[in-house]
Image (cartoon, coloured by chain):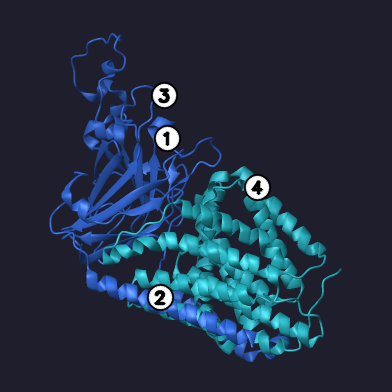
């Protein structure tokens, strides 16, 4: 074996060098590979878009259509939403992500046991993680931070009398939480003050935890076209389990959508794979016009490269025939 | 045993390249097994928290394999480009094009619009050149299927890149279904890459892998589809049986090529599997470029060896 390898000294030297270079790259955490997955550009905008999904700035920013697949392979039906459109901007150190998807029914009341809420979630690697986490609730050495927006939380607490019109409710004159057992136990869905978004942390199945510091805001609107939801959070966050953001950086993110009308909840949902969000330092094209010069240069470059490739392929094929 | 063990008359001139490309295939396979598969399924291990130390060691090993694969990719691509002569000028161009844009992207000089579309052009050029010049007519079927699947999936991902120049360009999600079908067609037709004849070991390997994959799909359809999407770029819209048979066909073709002494082609096939379909990262795209180039050089080598050994040449396209 060694004798045979000795006949290929050059290859062996290159192999050994590669082992050494690989170690050096790992030691210095230098990754020369660049992501080519789908990406969303989060440009800087001059005015805050606010929490309104219909704010003018969103109509000036391009959206990216991200395909979803049904997560629940073993369930019948699974996730039914096939794609979401995502947009992102940042303003004065605050990130805004707008997600929209088609859903003809507005499912925002979960007073009955058989009702389920429409919902959407964004998933990011938790801060301090160096490996890209598994999208299935993270992995042992790479946790995830999930922002979970629910339509029922967005709508606020509803009066059960609206659903159970014949119900008779005994009077209870106090407003403290003692007799609101879910709220007293700390169930965030029973607390109307926590907002429509829960910031969660996980590094494995069964370990999903609500973070102590809830600093993600969310607001959703439903129209005939479906839902549009805006998430917002400052770049900086005090909890170690939160995702971290900064201008001129990239961050991985994934999407999940639940359609309550189709009984979707928990693991029964539609999910994307990880996409990249580029948090750019440059301003967005906010004037509504097109950048004609860049467009022409890019188009010409592509034509030249494609033409060169086709020409060389034809040349090579003819040479082969001789 | 009906396998023809090839003894290429110019074997030594290819073996340095085979070692390098084989090393790249091994490193990327270890990376795929550990980094892209084990670490993502380890959450199913009971009491994983008590196994943090061994988990961390294995995970670091997978990351090391990833960096070694990146380090090996550079000399492997350079040697493959040099192996193509004038007849392989399109393939040389494709490899160089990819190398330039990937290096440019790593240094921040090339943006995603150029990187993605240049990568697609490189892969499609290589697949076209390989399929059209394949010495065996049927061998062009898996290559063409792979090229089409990669082009469809990659174009879907790269279409929104035009937003960089304020152009809205999106492809319908149906394009991904097409990529899925051609991806499965590629896997199912890979036995056509190997020569004819019976090979019991290859059949057993194919059957074993197919059964294992089927058990995995039936046992945990959700996680297996996640892995399928993440590892090879397929979304899992077809029944699990289709993917199990496809995995079996890939295993059959790989073992058959190895046992026929066609190591470079086997390494090329392995690189296409580890690289996956569609655009994921310049690392995985590099594996695909190296895989197609290795298959091309390997097929050329086999044809020359056949001619030198006096074996009848099969009709070219």
Left or right: residue B147 compared with residue A243: right
Is B148 or A67 nearer to us in this picture? Answer: B148
* Quarter holding residue A141: bottom left
Q: The numbered mark 3 sits on a residue in which chain?
A: A
Examine the rendering and report whether any part of residue A183 can be seen: yes
Secondary element type, mark 4: helix
- CA distance separating discs 1 and 3: 11 Å
Q: Is residue A261 above or below residue A270?
A: above
Say which chain is cyan. Answer: B
At which x and y percent is residue B86? 57, 89
Q: Is residue B251 above or below residue A55?
A: below
Is A273 or A214 nearer to us in this picture? Answer: A273
Q: Which residue is mark 1?
A: A265
Secondary element type, mark 1: loop
At which x and y percent is residue B150? 51, 64
Secondary element type, mark 2: loop
Q: Nearer the viewer, mark 2 or mark 1?
A: 1
Q: Which mark is residue A28?
A: 2
Q: Which mark is residue B241?
A: 4
Label 4, residues with CA under 10 Å away: few <14, some 14-19, many ≥20? some
Q: Are marks 3 and 2 in contact (CB under 8 Å)?
A: no
Q: Which residue is mark 3?
A: A114
């Amino acid at each position: 074996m060694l004798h045979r390898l000795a006949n290929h000294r050059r290859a062996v030297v290159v192999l050994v060098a590669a082992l050494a270079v690989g170690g050096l790259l790992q030691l210095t955490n230098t990754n020369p590979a660049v992501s080519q997955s789908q990406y969303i550009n989060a440009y800087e905008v001059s005015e805050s878009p606010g929490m309104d999904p219909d704010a003018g700035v969103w109509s000036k920013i391009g959206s990216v259509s991200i395909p979803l697949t049904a997560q629940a392979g073993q369930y019948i039906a699974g996730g039914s939403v096939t794609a979401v459109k995502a947009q992102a901007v940042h303003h004065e150190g605050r990130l805004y992500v707008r997600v929209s998807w088609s859903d003809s029914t507005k499912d925002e009341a979960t007073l009955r046991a058989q009702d389920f809420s429409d919902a959407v979630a964004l998933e990011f690697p938790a801060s301090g993680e160096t490996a890209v986490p598994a999208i299935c609730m993270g992995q042992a050495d790479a946790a995830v931070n999930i922002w979970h927006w629910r339509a029922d939380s967005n709508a606020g607490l509803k009066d059960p009398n609206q659903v159970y019109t014949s119900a008779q409710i005994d009077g209870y004159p106090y407003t403290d939480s003692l007799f609101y057992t879910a709220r007293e136990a700390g169930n965030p869905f029973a607390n109307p003050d926590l907002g429509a978004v829960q910031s969660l942390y996980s590094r494995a199945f069964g370990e999903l935890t609500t973070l102590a510091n809830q600093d993600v805001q969310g607001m959703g609107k439903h129209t005939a076209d479906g839902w549009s939801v805006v998430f917002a959070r400052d770049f900086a966050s005090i909890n170690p389990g939160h995702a971290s953001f900064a201008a001129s950086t990239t961050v991985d993110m994934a999407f999940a959508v639940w359609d309550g009308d189709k009984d979707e909840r928990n693991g029964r949902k539609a999910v994307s794979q990880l996409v990249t969000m580029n948090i750019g330092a440059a301003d967005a094209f906010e004037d509504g016009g097109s950048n004609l010069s860049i467009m022409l240069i890019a188009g010409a470059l592509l034509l030249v490269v494609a033409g060169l490739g086709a020409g060389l392929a034809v040349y090579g094929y003819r040479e082969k025939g001789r | 045993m009906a396998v023809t063990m090839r003894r290429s008359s110019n074997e030594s001139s290819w073996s340095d390249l085979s070692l390098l490309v084989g090393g790249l295939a091994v490193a990327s396979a270890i990376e795929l097994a550990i980094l892209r598969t084990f670490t993502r399924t380890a959450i199913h291990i009971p009491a994983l928290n008590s196994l943090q130390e061994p988990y961390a060691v294995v995970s670091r090993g997978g990351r090391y394999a990833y960096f070694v694969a990146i380090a090996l990719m550079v000399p492997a691509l350079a040697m493959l480009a040099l192996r193509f002569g004038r007849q392989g000028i399109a393939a040389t161009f494709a490899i160089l094009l990819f190398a330039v844009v990937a290096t440019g992207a790593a240094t921040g000089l090339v943006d995603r619009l150029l990187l993605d579309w240049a990568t697609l052009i490189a892969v499609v050029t290589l697949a076209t050149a390989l399929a059209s010049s394949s010495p065996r007519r049927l061998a062009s079927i898996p290559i063409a299927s792979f090229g089409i699947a990669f082009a469809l999936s990659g174009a879907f991902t790269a279409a929104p890149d035009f937003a960089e120049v304020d152009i809205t360009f999106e492809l319908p999600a149906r394009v991904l279904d097409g990529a899925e079908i051609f991806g499965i067609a590629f896997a199912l037709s890979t036995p056509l890459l190997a020569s004819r004849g019976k090979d019991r070991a290859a059949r057993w390997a194919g059957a074993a892998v197919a059964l294992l994959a089927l058990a995995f799909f039936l046992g945990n359809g959700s996680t297996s589809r996640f892995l399928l999407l993440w590892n090879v770029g397929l979304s899992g819209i077809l029944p699990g049986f289709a993917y199990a048979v496809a995995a079996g066909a890939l295993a059959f073709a790989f073992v058959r090529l190895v046992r026929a002494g066609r190591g470079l082609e086997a390494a090329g096939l392995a690189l296409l599997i580890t690289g996956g379909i569609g655009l994921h990262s310049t690392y995985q795209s590099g594996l695909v470029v190296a895989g197609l180039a290795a298959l091309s050089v390997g097929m050329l080598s086999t044809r020359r060896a056949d001619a030198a050994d006096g074996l009848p040449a099969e009709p070219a396209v």
